[in-house]
Image (spheres, helix red, strand yellow):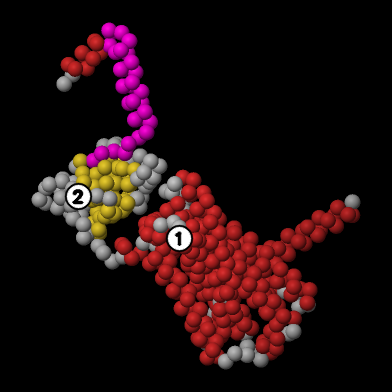
Amino acid sequence: MMSRKTLDLWVGVFVAIGFGALLFLALKVANLSSFAGAGAYQINAKFDNIGGLKVRAPVKSSGVVVGRVREIHFDNQTFEAVVTMSIESRYQFPKDTSAKILTSGLLGEQFIGLSAGGDTVNLHDGDALKITQSAVVLENLISQFLYSAAEGGGKAAEGGGKAVEGAGKKKP
Amino acid sequence: MSDASELLRRLGAHVTGMIWRLGFATRFFLLILKHSGTSFRRFHLTVREMYFSGVQSLIIIIVSGLFVGMVLGLQGYDTLVRYGSSEALGVLVALSLVRELGPVVAGLLFASRAGSAITAEIGLMKATEQLDAMEMMAVDPIARVVAPRFWAGVISMPLLAALFSAMGVFGGYLVGVRMIGVDEGSFWSQMKAAVDFGDDVLNGVIKSFVFGIAITWIAVFEGYDAPPTAEGVSGATTRTVVTASLWVLALDFVLTALMFRGD
């Protein structure tokens, strides 16, 4: 039978290894170190269409992650999606910053890209972004392309296309 | 006719027996909770059991974690490289280990390595009338024998699961970065960006904690309930491994459905 001292030593080693592994998972594998402690402020943005944006998606500016999407809900008054982002306090943005929903790569996840404006006043907690650009929806792109292709084809085929073109020009 | 009624009678006895065991197991669990004061007041009792269930499971957990991670690295790379996203290997290895494989495989190993030992030990103590002797000396066997083993298992299991995941990530790193040559920077940074501490790591720890409770509960109960014969103890040991493994997998499904519903 082992003495109690050796036993305690081994169990101590075991617990230390276990907590070490947990610490490794928290700091090296997960992102606990990057968002710990530092304060964050919330800003809102309204989008016509958020595409496949998910909660916890990154918010990037010039490609650098500055925050995360906190919450997404639907505004039943304006019929728009309202996205709440939490931005790390060390990153300050001017009031006329614009937000776009972008996709990383061709099939990658969607994220919000912030482009800073030129205003001298910075955004504060709870502010809303005025200028936003919705996600690109593939189906809309295709239908736009087909529509313009069909229109172009019509023009080339017969003179009737000119009338359509003329009508289009009057509008503005 | 008598054959049919005999069959029916046996089926009924079997079902009643199962329900009786379920009720006894629940009462036994509450008894353990009631008598667990001793395992914390005289903590060296629990520490001693942690040596047997935790420290002695270290080798098997470390080695299997390493191998599972290395296999994940190879298989993950094989698939990911077809889509030109081999840098996401770290994400694949880390998420599958931290969320699922770490707690589940560590739980299965723990059930067969430590759970069976607990059942055999308590069952043999009962068969050789050591538990009765304790009661004669006014020592409560549940407080002195069962509760420390239970708490030792519950404490050890999350630590073993975390160790399994960490070793698996290391194994994936060895194969992916050192052997195949995936870029080291993107391996770690993509992993860090994708794995969340609260949603992934902590949920994994909660899972392994629940598995620890289920496995050791089944192990101590089967040991305590074992018929006091050689056959009875061996049957109880087998039942521990089978029941605990099934419960780990079933609970894993329930917990996964609750935690990762995919918002």
| Quadrant of res B243 | bottom right
Q: Which residue lies furthest to the top in this view?
A: A159
**Magenta stretch secondary structure, dominant:** helix
Label 2 vs label 1: CA separation?
Answer: 44 Å
Question: Residue at point 42% right, 69% down?
Answer: A24
Q: Does the rendering let one see residue B178?
A: yes
Where residue A75 appears, as percent x and y from the top left, is 29, 41
Q: Mark 2 lies on which chain?
A: A
| In-image side of A93 versus A64 (left or right) | left
- Amino acid type indicated by mark 1: Val
Badge 2 marks a residue whose secondary structure is strand
As displayed, is residue B50 above or below residue A63?
below
Where residue B19 appears, as percent x and y from the top left, is 69, 63
Badge 1 marks a residue whose secondary structure is helix
Where residue A115 appears, as percent x and y from the top left, is 21, 46
Residue range corresponding to the magenta coloring: A132-161
Residue at mark 2 shares a chain with residue at mark 1: no
Q: Mark 1 lies on which chain?
A: B
Question: Residue at point 19% right, 42% down?
Answer: A130
Numbered disc in front, either 2 or 1: 1
- Amino acid type indicated by mark 2: Asp
As displayed, is residue A130 above or below residue B99?
above
Where residue B72 appears, as percent x and y from the top left, is 53, 58
Q: Mark 2 points at which residue?
A: A127
Q: Mark 1 points at which residue?
A: B177
As displayed, is residue B220 above or below residue A146?
below
| In-image side of A116 versus B136 (left or right) | left
Considering depth in this image, is B216 or B24 the residue closer to the camera? Answer: B216
Considering depth in this image, is A71 or A137 the residue closer to the camera? Answer: A137
Question: Residue at point 73% right, 62% down?
Answer: B16
Residue A143, magenta (yes or no): yes
Q: Residue furthest left?
A: A120
